[in-house]
Each structure stands twice: as C-alpha cells, then as structure tokens.
Amino acid sequence: MPVYLDHAATTPMRPEAIEAYARALAVVGNPSSIHGHGQQARRVLEEAREAVASTLGCDPIEVVFTSGGTEAVNLAIKGFYWARNASASRPRILVPGGEHHATVDAVGWLESAEGAQPDWLPLDREGRIRPVTVQHPDDVALLTFLAVNNEVGTVQPVEALAAAGREAGIPVHVDAVAAYGHLPLDARALGVDALSVSAHKIGGPVGIGALVLSRTSSVVPLIHGGGQQRQVRSGTQDVAAAVAFAVAARAAADELQAEATRLSALRDRLIAGVREAVPEAVLSGPEPASGERVASNAHFMFPGAQGDSLLFLLDLAGISVSTGSACQAGVLEPSHVLLAMGRSEREARSALRFTLGRTSTEAEVDALVAALPGAYAQAARAGLAERAPRLGA
C-alpha cells in the first residue's frame, strides 16, 4: 500500500469538504451581483468567511480570501512595503533566514525591482528566530516571519516577535501556513497586523487561502479590478472553494487538540524508529520534548547521502517524502533553511522531511522505518559519485 508522508506539501482533502464543495458548485450567481441569485451567493460566501474567521481569532471582514498561501504572503509583504513607502522612505524589511520561498522570493523581487533592503535575521542551530531588537525603526517597512518553520518544524515565539514589532511601530506579518490546523491561531491575541493561511494544508481545496488583515492596517493591493474584499483583493470570489475551506477549517479546529496529541505520539515513534534504523541520521530542529517542534514534522539529515537520492529510492518503495518545500518547483538544491541554521552545504543536501497528517498511521511510519536502512545504504554508496570525474577516466 502506498505510504504518504508529505502532508506539509498538501494533505488529502476531507470528504466533508469535498461534499460541501460539490454542493456549493450548484450555487448560481456572482456574489457581487445585487439580484436575488447574487445575494444568495453572497450569503453563502459570507457564512464561509465567518467560519474561517472563527478559527483565526479575527473579525470576518478581516479575512481576505486569496488563491492560496503564496498570494497571501505576497499581498502582505509587497502590500505593506508599498503602503509604508508611499509617504516616506522605509526600504528595510526585517525577515529571518530560512523562510518559505514565498517570502524569500517576494523580498528578493522587492530588493531588485524596488530597492528594498532586507535585514536577514539570524536563526540558531535549532531553527529558532533569535530575539529581535528593532534598530532605527523609522526606515523599516515591516517585519515578516514564519509561525512554524515549514521545513524543520520549529515553532517560533510569535507573540514575543510581534511585540517587538509593535513596540517599534512597524507592521508585523506572520506566515502561519505551516501552523494552521496544528497550533491554535488567534490573530488578535498574537498582536499581528496580518497572518497568512492556506486551505489545502488543512484538508480544504487547492486554490484558496486567506490573508487576515487587521481593520487598522493598510496595504496596496496586488490585483486591481472590481474592488472586492475591502478593495484589497479584487476579483470574483470563489464561493464553492470558500465553502469547502470553511468546512475544513471548522473540522481542523474541532480536532486540533486531539490530533496534536495523536500526531505527537506518531512523530515520536517515527523519530525513534529512524534513529534506530539509521543511527547516523541527525534530527534537524528542536527535540520533541522541548515543546518547540510542531507535532506533524520530523526532519533528518543523512550524512554521506544525497536527500534527493533517498527520496527517489523511497519513492520506488512506494513511500512519498520530501527534501523540503514543494513550492521550490522541483529544483534540487541544498536546503536554504539548513544553511541559515549554520549547517554546511553537504549537510544541507542530505536532508529529508517527513510530515504527518490526519490520515497518517503507525503502519505507514513502520513501513518507512523498515525501508530506510536499505535506501540509506544505497544512497550513501551513490553519494561517493558526487566528486567530479577525471578526464579520460
């Protein structure tokens, strides 16, 4: 039976979300239309927005539906940057190393196209963002960071980091895509200005996410058109996707504590099994007992082996894992997260990420552990071929 251990990339859509999606596809009417059909669609859409808001500790009007987490992150980072630079020069962006590529690439684009000046905040050896002291806040556009590192699973001190931003008077955006459905999220209590999430990480459909944007925050939109959603994100809204997102969000919130307990035990079983099967393997990120690791994540370095070789060998055995974020479009490169944590390039090329979800079982974990020794031995042998061959050899 195939084994799926890449839930951080995407997790199976919940059956109840599929059913709700199919029913909502029959709703006729553009929710921006003022006739009866349009207003019926609007009612269904706003009920979905209310449900999503209830899982994120915000008002419904603060939920801006997007095409997914990447758009939400881009809208927050670029939108805050442009808004903050409209009346004064604030070129600096405070951003930790090891962020998701949605952030890294958005900041990189602003750097090349708009003259932004990223201040890359350091990570410690476990992937924690070190305490932030904002120097010269008058020229800072925003602070942005992950709530949970999507590769190594480190849970970040969101409240403390957000407090540092508030004290400096700068907007704070949190990429909570990897935290949603695993940790309680309350945007108001966390004291953040914006927070990004994605539906397909919690059993909703691909193609919809949300940016929680506080009532008091202003961003310049990425998309211009009909002025929907507070004129922050124009375009006809996808009612069916919003409904399915809401169903998945409610279910994930209802199950959160029980699933955290179950997945923590399953993660610990996986970590112990990997360490026994491959004693050379090195866990990346905090030890589980620290309480600073998300329940769904186990990330290892396998010395002497290439992570992509291990991935392909495990795939041949019917086991799906990853070397890091799937959003890097299949490019095989050293983990920028591990590099930011102070690992060498060789170590950063030896990584595998195992992520658990609602459908994960002990049998799947045990199948991985059984397949690893052989895969590692073969990958380690192949790893010796990375040296450049001599001419004429």
Image: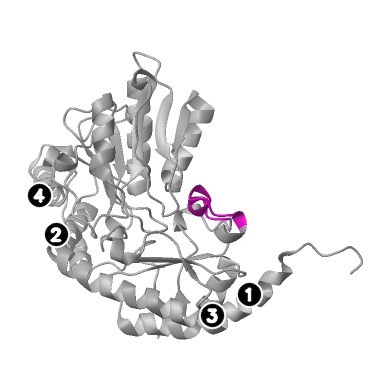
Relative placement, left or right, of 51 versus 273 is: left
Indicate which disc, 2 or 4, sits on the residue closer to the N terminus: 4
Determine the image quadrant of residue 14. Answer: bottom left
Q: In which quarter of the image is the C terminus?
A: bottom right
- Secondary structure under the numbered disc 4 in the rendered image: helix
The residue that label 2 is drawn on is: 250
- Nearer-the-camera pick, 242 or 6: 6
Marks 1 and 3 sit apart, C-alpha to C-alpha, by 17 Å
The residue that label 3 is drawn on is: 316
- Residue at 37% from the left image edge and 60% from the top image edge: 286
- Residue at 75% from the left image edge and 64% from the top image edge: 387
Q: Position of residue 54 (x, y in %)?
A: 11, 50
Q: Where is residue 360 in the image (x, y as percent from the top left)?
A: 31, 76
- Can you see residue 109? yes
In this picture, which residue range is highlighted in magenta? 334-345
Indicate which disc, 1 or 3, sits on the residue closer to the N terminus: 3
Q: Which amino acid does label 1 sit on?
A: Ala
Instruction: Tell me: residue 122, above or below residue 393.
Output: above
The residue that label 4 is drawn on is: 47
Instruction: Tell me: residue 32, above or below residue 348.
Output: above
Relative placement, left or right, of 377 versus 143 is: right
Marks 3 and 4 sit apart, C-alpha to C-alpha, by 44 Å
Marks 2 and 1 sit apart, C-alpha to C-alpha, by 44 Å
The residue that label 1 is drawn on is: 380
